[in-house]
Image: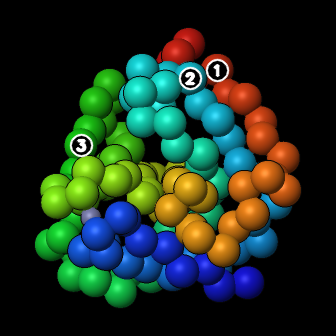
Amino acid sequence: MIYSGSCHCGAIAFEVEAEITEAMDCNCSMCRRRGGLLTFVPRDRLTLQTPASELSTYEFNRHVIRHHFCAICGIAPFADGEGKDGPMAAVNVRCLPDVDLEALTITKFDGKRF
Ligand SMILES: [Zn+2]
């Protein structure tokens, strides 16, 4: 299935091809503040529909994940980085309006240990 996603103001819009039935709730220093729910897809399944220049990017810790956010509305729709099987994206499913959040299986991830 192809989901449309965006930040709040629409400066960042994208499509992601995935079967989304579950999401990860991470407690790392960033996720606990941001409050997103993440699902992981190969980076090439995510297609930006707005210019890449609209992405503001934050990195921390080991600087291996690029946390993208919108400089206008502040929403963080996805991150990307190198996974063990190639480039991956971590999509904030809260930014995909067609995902029924109540139907997802939520897995807790103890990211604060890393
Ligand atoms: Zn925005």
* Residue at x-position 35% and y-position 86%: 49
Residue at 53%, 16% (x, y): give it: 112
Residue marked by disc 2: 27
Q: Quadrant of residue 100?
A: bottom right
Say left or right for 62 vs 107.
left
Cα gap from disc 2 to disc 1, whole angstroms: 6 Å
In the rendered view, would you say 61 is above or below 55?
above
Q: Is residue 74 left or right of residue 38?
A: left
Q: Element at badge 3?
A: strand
The residue type indicated by label 3 comes to Tyr
Label 3 crowd (10 A; few <14 / some 14-19 / many >=20): few
Asked where in the image residue 8 lies, by quadrant, the reply is: bottom left
According to the picture, the residue beneath numbered tag 1 turns out to be 110
Where 58 falls versus 88 (above or below)? above
Horizontal side of residue 9 vs 14, given as left or right:
left
Q: Is the residue 13 above or below the residue 106 in the image?
A: below
Mark 2 CB lies closer than 8 A to ligand 1:
no
Along the polypeptide, which appears first: circle 1 or circle 3?
Answer: 3
3D distance between C-alphas at marks 3 and 2: 18 Å
Q: Which mark is residue 58?
A: 3
The mark that comes first in sequence, 3 or 2, is 2
